[in-house]
Image (cartoon, rainbow, N blue to C red):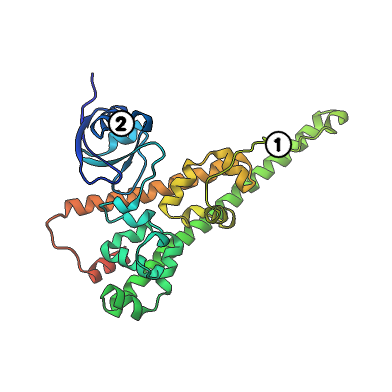
Amino acid sequence: MAAPLKRCLVRRRDGRQQHGVAASCLRELREKASGILALDKAREPITLVLAEDGTIVDDEDYFLCLPSNTKFVALAKNEKWSSKSLDSGTAWLSESVDEVDSGAEKWKQLARRLKDDLSNIILMSEEDLQVLIDVPRSDLAEELAQSQTKIQVLQDTLQQVLDRREEERQSRQLLELYLEALKNEDSILSKVAASETVPRKEMDVVDTGTSSTGTSAKTSLSDQILAALKEKSAPELCLDSQDLELVLKEDTEALASALRWEKQKAEALQQACDQELSKRLQQVQTLHSLRSTSKGKKTLPWGDWLSSKRKK
């Protein structure tokens, strides 16, 4: 039985004109998008990303989970997604301060994103949260055109989010220590058992457990991201969503080589990044769903929204 067709909207990276496409699978959508957008064969294959936040869609199951009329941006070969062409309130996720035309300070850029949509708090990195918490209340109130009382509530909410992530990091550290202790205990017990059964001559041959792949693979991650991965105990909580995606796309062996880690540790890091990114995306989807169901109703004032967040 043929799969049902899904209605989609596609456009080029720098184009504003959207084209309606009906496709039953991701492969069919790529083929039709290439034809409709008149892409040169030499510039194929194309990459489809969500127009909302630049998420790369390369999994058939994920495509099937997307709602009808989802907006896609088609990127030709060697093209990269740009936040400047976004039409969503989450455009700031992939936008660095250096790329912003305005010369304002970083905290002002972050404050303006919050002014557009307070739910962006969920998607901020720990560094961004701390920047807004450290801003003088009077300055932030002036920038957001709010009273200092509401700004205090806002900064308290930001601190709560930051504290929750710190608790998650500490919990993970305790779990890692516990698992490491179990691993060491199992290793000691296995060695004791081996010493009782293996002849002395065979025991002299010790497996160091270290191996070198001799790989010359290089990572494309920036020095800033690599530094965060090395220095932070739970780096997935410190990186923004775009950096998490970059870590997931990176080759595991190249990542392990760049960090001078074992491959298993690099794989665990990528799994943690995947889980954190999935959690953030799920939170965003939940917020969008709540907005959709409450469409037409009066929007909560800033104070009411923040107060409701603090009660949870």
Residue 30: image tag: 2
Q: Which residue is mark 1?
A: 211
Q: Residue at x 23, y 29 (%)?
A: 23
Residue 45 in view (yes/no): no
Of discs 2 and 1, which sits in the foreground?
2
Please state which amino acid type lies under the numbered disc 1.
Ser
Q: Quadrant of the C terminus?
A: bottom left
Residue 88 picture location, percent across and down: 26, 53
Residue 309 in view (yes/no): yes
Please state which amino acid type lies under the numbered disc 2.
Arg
Q: Secondary structure at mark 1?
A: loop
Quick check: 118 above or below 222?
A: below
Q: Residue at x 61, y 52 (%)?
A: 177
Q: Residue at x 56, y 44 (%)?
A: 219
Residue 300 picture location, percent across and down: 19, 65
Q: Nearer the viewer, residue 175 or 100?
A: 100
Q: Nearer the viewer, residue 225 or 100?
A: 100
Quick check: 26 above or below 17?
A: above
Quick check: 1 above or below 224?
A: above
Image quadrant where residue 203 sits: top right
Q: Nearer the viewer, residue 184 or 25?
A: 25
Q: How many neighbours does mark 2 have within 10 angstroms: few (below 14), some (14-19), or many (20 or more)?
A: some
Image quadrant where residue 100 sits: bottom left
Q: Secondary structure at mark 2?
A: helix
- Pointer 2 with pointer 1, Cβ within 8 A: no
